[in-house]
Image (cartoon, coloured by chain):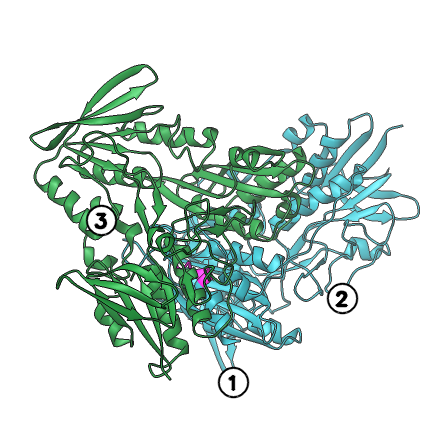
Chain colours: A cyan, B green
Amino acid sequence: MTRRLVIIGGDAAGMSAAAQARRMKTVDELEIVAFERTSRTSYAACGLPYLVGGIVTSPDSLIARTPEQHRAKGIDVRTRHEVTAIDVKGSAVTVRDLDAGLESTVHFDELLIGTGASGLWPRWPGIDAKGVLQLRTLDDAAEVERWLVAGARRAVVVGAGYIGLEVAEGLLKRGLHVTVVERLDAPMGAVLDADMATDVAGAMRAAGIDLRLGTAVTGFTVIDGRVATVETAAGAVTGAVEADIVVIGLGVRANAELARAAGIGVGESGGIHVDDRLRTDQPHIWAAGDCVESRHRMTGQSVVVALGTHANKQGRVVGTNIAGGNAAFGGVLGTAITRFQDLEIARTGLTEKEAAAAGFDAIGVTTEASTRAQYYPGAQPMKVKVVVERGSGLLLGAQIVGGADAGKRIDVLATALWNRMTVAEVAGMDLSYAPPFSSVWDPVLLAAGKAAAMI
Amino acid sequence: MTRRLVIIGGDAAGMSAAAQARRMKTVDELEIVAFERTSRTSYAACGLPYLVGGIVTSPDSLIARTPEQHRAKGIDVRTRHEVTAIDVKGSAVTVRDLDAGLESTVHFDELLIGTGASGLWPRWPGIDAKGVLQLRTLDDAAEVERWLVAGARRAVVVGAGYIGLEVAEGLLKRGLHVTVVERLDAPMGAVLDADMATDVAGAMRAAGIDLRLGTAVTGFTVIDGRVATVETAAGAVTGAVEADIVVIGLGVRANAELARAAGIGVGESGGIHVDDRLRTDQPHIWAAGDCVESRHRMTGQSVVVALGTHANKQGRVVGTNIAGGNAAFGGVLGTAITRFQDLEIARTGLTEKEAAAAGFDAIGVTTEASTRAQYYPGAQPMKVKVVVERGSGLLLGAQIVGGADAGKRIDVLATALWNRMTVAEVAGMDLSYAPPFSSVWDPVLLAAGKAAAMI
């Protein structure tokens, strides 16, 4: 008999799972129905800032696979359909056809929740004014584009995390005057230690960004329904920044309401709780992607890390399991990379601050290195910070800030973390060397060696 | 009482060891005397092809540390001094002062042999003619430069390995007509599988190199003491290539004669045999760098891998041990990287061919990927080949050939090899992702995932 897999959410996690399950099961064995409330599936949200900046020129190029392409693979994708409720006992979902306005009930044998995450949107006075935007979807990007074409000249970006940094770069590239307002004392304050963030702040200011650190947004003044200024407070000092557009880039929270309302377990992190095979606390209900919490391999704690790379991996794992296979998601290290103009920024594992908060007796050791042999043209300075457990020498985390070709070296340290290596072990590894690619002591080895000598 | 460490050879291994021992022991505790037969210490031989090509413009920039700089650190460097014999029982070496022509005997408490390697120089008829060169030292580079300045227009490079490839690129850049003669059927034939080498051959030919594969050199015709043609044989077909200069780039052999003559153990690989702490079979005699054999971590076999990165690491290990510490060299994976113009070439562990020769039941799986998100400008194609043990899925080796930013990703696979990961484990790792740096499935994860699905 044909069983039915229902998927809620047609983006990375949901559609990866669908594709994987379809590889393993025929249409006769497993019917796959995916409900997506927007009109699009499987697009690269991470590319949106580059679309705004004009580096990527075609919105269509961000679409990995259209609904039609999924359908051609035997996946019944229904766009503009929103699942409004899950009936756990009855093994059914309530679905609203957003165009027709009709509601129906659809039975499932297996259910996958891939509802993603939403951008944080604080209840600041005036936040719903025209011109206050976010950048989570292709429609959001089109909206930003409309404002730019209409002549917006002054932009305020709220938040100096990944999205804030990337959007600020894009808007700057489009010729706007850009102010970035950040509550913390450093850009990337949630992902880098303060000493590593200094170079990022320097690069932003050198590029012409008005970077306001330690500054909270308190609200917006609105004129004729449009945002006019961003009201700020830095300690006791209040201020205002004129803005034609404001982009809120404050991170995300998991979309777990649907699961919670159905009585499915949600963790303290705010993400849906799943086991290593990505099953929820209900036997035939699974969850994957930005809406779930994952195990951090260095702390053992549950965290929500909303990244396409996890969503894709989790989709494949859960698709395998739903199709009767056996796969596990190995957890996360918090590895991430971005860049601001020519400055590459990457991290993995725990920062010094995070390590302390997790109860480790840890030290941070920063090494200045070069992306190529010093004598080779184009060599760029780079800094590698490693965070190490005192005594054991266990590598707990790493951060890299530097010029071209610096950032991706974080993956070597992520691989070392994944294998729970000590810095002494890392320092002894056989990494590649030639003058156009590194100094004879590769920056990663150099950093690990320096740390090993200090603990 | 002050003990004396004598070092034979003042390049990477010897001088790294000296520096490390000096960090740990004062001048009163340990006297360090290093004998070097040339007039230079510690220079970056790997940079020589880029000096020839004019990418690196100053020979001095390749000198990491001069004899004077070493002396200022309390290391007694004696250049133009050649050690001609080791008296193991008497704990002494015979040293010839090459300028004064005097021989003396110097006692040691500890001896480090760091005699390096020599370029292979086959006994082909005519090989000692003027214009037949190699590129192992700064003097060699100066000699090549003299021939170029004197008007050499046609160059033949013998061997299409790392050095051959890099020298060919350099000479091409200098405007010469370049022929590369290679005995094997592919460039990089000793380090890449044939399928991966195809792109290298293509790039060489596209750049204008006359690449003659499957072609052996049989000798040289010499006119007035100068090389005139390179005589070749491809199967039964003989030929000749006109040449103003010939550069021999055929790899190296360990300089182990001095050790062998003293009765110190030399392995079948031709390298001096050492334990993990880099001690020879004599209690107070150590060896490090290109002259020793190392344990290959994937096969357990002893191999000679002449690379500056190992020489530096081994120097630090042996310096630590001589100074009374305890360090071990962890072995090699055969990791290496180079590039030909815009094409990056890297490898680690075993090729498919090497894995079969070592007795593994292995398969090779090649994946086509992209260095950036497909939609991001500048994305370059890259190929990743992984070699995997059938059944267990143990990663045995990897090769990468591709555009800018492709090559250094080999270090992630080297780290995975170092930790004996399976491809399924590799595919699940948390590597960094952002559109300017990789596709959402990083090429390494993609390659591992594809292989995991096939074994």
User: What chain does mark 2 sit on?
Assistant: A
- Secondary element under disc 3, as helix, strand or loop, is helix
Q: CA distance from mark 1 to mark 2?
A: 33 Å
Of marks 1 and 2, the one in the foreground: 2
Residue B328 image position (x, y, % from top left): 51, 63
Which residue type carries mark 3?
Answer: Leu
Q: CA distance from mark 2 to mark 3?
A: 59 Å
Pick the front one: B263 or A389: B263
Whether the magenta-drawn stretch holds residue A442 is answered as yes
Can residue A130 be seen at all in this image of the molecule? no
Residue position marked by numbered label 1 in the rendering: A236
Magenta range: A441-445
Residue position marked by numbered label 2 in the rendering: A268
Identify the main secondary structure in magenta: helix
Q: CA distance from mark 1 to mark 3?
A: 60 Å
Residue position marked by numbered label 3 in the rendering: B51
